[in-house]
Image (cartoon, grey):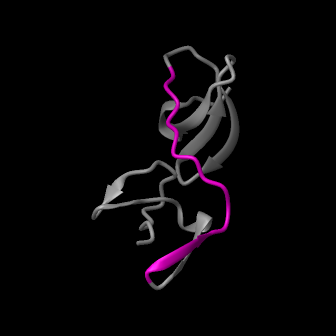
């Protein structure tokens, strides 16, 4: 079964399937074709940390910490510098 879309790059359970942003998948009936790469990795951050934001999508940012660890962070917890 094709994952449902909920507008968030973060993977979440939706009726037994995984969710992903609509712009990353083309839904064709009960199947789908990925249009772009997708990783459902969340990035843990702490107050004062300054991750490098590489992409903003659906209220989330794909960011990389100085240690080269990357993942999705909600934009609402980031402050623009």
User: Is 16 positioned to the left or the right of 64 in the image?
Assistant: left
Query: Would residue 8 be counted in the magenta stretch?
Result: no
Percent position (x, y) of residue 72? 55, 39
Taking 51 as reference, is 41 above or below it? below
**Residue range of the region highlighted in magenta in the rendering:** 30-45
Give the left or right position of residue 24, taking residue 18 as reference: right
* The C terminus lies in quadrant: top right
Which residue is found at the position 49% from the left and 78% from the top? 31
Query: Does the magenta segment cover residue 44?
Result: yes
- Residue under the image location 58 percent in, 68 percent down: 25
Q: Position of residue 23 (x, y in %)?
A: 60, 66
Please name the predominant secondary structure of the magenta segment in the image. loop
Where is residue 44 drawn, in percent x and y?
A: 49, 25
Which residue does the image show at 52% across and 30% down from the upper left? 43
User: Given the current orientation, which residue lies at the most extreme bottom position?
Assistant: 29
Q: Quadrant of residue 5?
A: bottom left
Give 81 or 73, whichever is nearer the viewer. 73
Q: Is residue 47 above or below residue 44?
A: above
Q: Is residue 1 above or below residue 52?
A: below
């Amino acid at each position: 079964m094709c994952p449902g879309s909920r507008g968030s790059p973060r993977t979440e359970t939706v009726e037994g399937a995984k969710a992903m942003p609509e712009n990353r998948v083309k839904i064709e009936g009960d199947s789908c074709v990925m249009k772009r790469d997708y990783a459902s990795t969340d990035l843990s951050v702490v107050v004062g940390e300054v991750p490098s934001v590489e992409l903003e999508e659906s209220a989330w940012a794909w960011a990389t910490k100085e240690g080269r660890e990357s993942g999705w962070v909600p934009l609402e917890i980031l402050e623009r510098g």
